[in-house]
Image (cartoon, grey):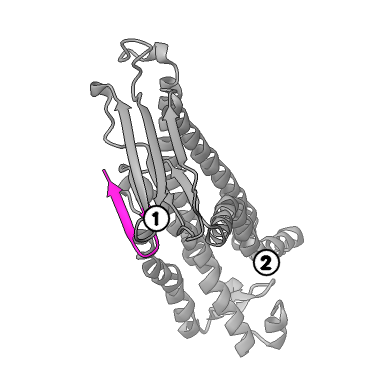
Amino acid sequence: MISQSGITYGTSSCLCQFQAFLIQWFMPADALWTLAMACNVYLTFFHKYNSEQLRQLEWKYLLFCYGLPFIPAFVYFFIETEARGKVYGSAILWCWVSRSWGFLRIAVFYGPVWFVIFLTFAIYLRAGKVIFEKRRQLEKAECPDSCGEIDSPMEPAFSKKTEIHVTSEITHSGSESNRLTITSASHIPHRYLSPYSPYSVTIEGGSASAHDEHVPMRTLRSSQHDPYAQRRATARDVNSAAWAYTKYAMLFFIALLVTWVPSTINRLYALIYPHNFNFGMNYTSSFVLPLQGFWNSIIYISISWPAFKEAYAKIKWRNSAHRGPSQHTITGHGALGSLHSHGNDSTRALTG
């Protein structure tokens, strides 16, 4: 918006000094925020941080990403010499660090930015190595012939056969209530017993109408006979995570190259040849640098779109569930199987 208006008003004008201050403060913050996101990946992968713990770090990220570049941006207001003049002045494209202080562009701006970029890539490469190592291990485990620990095809590793019978019946003795009968039969080879139970059952029933004389019996039956189903599901999850990571790393890499490489080359050229003007390099820098927010938004939308769709589907499902009289759902997660029955004013829970 300011463009070259600051230069037109004069390098000592408030508009020019303000524009230079904004550029020196906020453009490096973009690279620091990408480092903060990489730190979240590192803490999640290697220190098992959950979403709540990551949220508690946000105020620290805020101070770090905006506080660190604020220091030189503010100090530059008070630096002035007779030979070079003020730090903030004309940078041809806009007001920023003047050409007489060109070494500060590399030492305090582009140098730290590229250090942060390399550190960010190092974190993602480390996380990516772990992801693809786990993926190869799961791919090898897909073939039972290559697993020496399996004694027979009938007892593969991690096999589990579970049958769950849930029978619900509504009675009208005294007050409306729900009576649930649950039988569960499981066969798990002892030496392959996993500490996590791969299923949970949730049943929610609405209140019965007093006019219902005959309510049909509802029986819900779930059985798992494929011993490799859980392993294949895990492999699919890891493959999806690996692909999401790869897509993010590729987009992130391209965005950084598009944003910072042309402008860095332009400033290095200006430092080496301070009296030469390269129109092509300056034009490219003026085009790519203001678009860094646009590239960040493209990355965010492309990576987060499945999460947006999932959240929307959950909201839509909850709204439809509240309008319906009753619902019966089964979910497969967690280390505990749980049953919840909701009557008129009471809640019964069975966990184990």
Q: Looking at numbered disc 2 in the image, what kind of residue is underneath it?
A: His
Residue ID at (38%, 12%): 153
Q: Which residue is disc 2 drawn over? A: 275
Residue 352 at what x, y percent from top left? 26, 43
Q: How crowded is mark 2: few (under 14 residues within 10 Å), some or many (20 or more)?
A: few
Residue 311 at what x, y percent from top left? 54, 56
- As for residue 343 lying within the magenta part, the answer is yes
Q: What label does residue 207 carry, if any?
A: none
Disc 2 secondary structure class: loop
Q: Residues within 10 Å of mark 1 (few under 14, many from 20)?
A: few
Question: Would you say residue 132 is visible in this rendering?
Answer: no
- As for residue 188 lying within the magenta part, the answer is no
Q: Residue furthest right?
A: 279
Q: Looking at numbered disc 1 in the image, what kind of residue is underneath it?
A: His
Disc 1 secondary structure class: loop
Residue 288 vertical position relative to residue 165 in the rendered view, above or below: below
Q: In which quarter of the image is residue 320?
A: bottom right
Residue 73 at what x, y percent from top left? 48, 76
- Does the residue at mark 2 contact the one at mark 1 (Cβ under 8 Å)? no
Residue ID at (61%, 60%): 297
Q: Which of 165 and 236 is in front in this view?
A: 165
Q: What label does residue 172 carry, if any?
A: 1
- The magenta stretch is 341-352
Residue 253 at what x, y percent from top left? 57, 48
> Along the horizontal axis of the image, is 276 left or right of 167?
right
> Along the horizontal axis of the image, is 208 left or right of 158?
right
Q: Quadrant of residue 71?
A: bottom left
Task: Mark 2 vs mark 1: give the one in front.
Answer: 1
Image quadrant occupied by the N terminus = bottom right
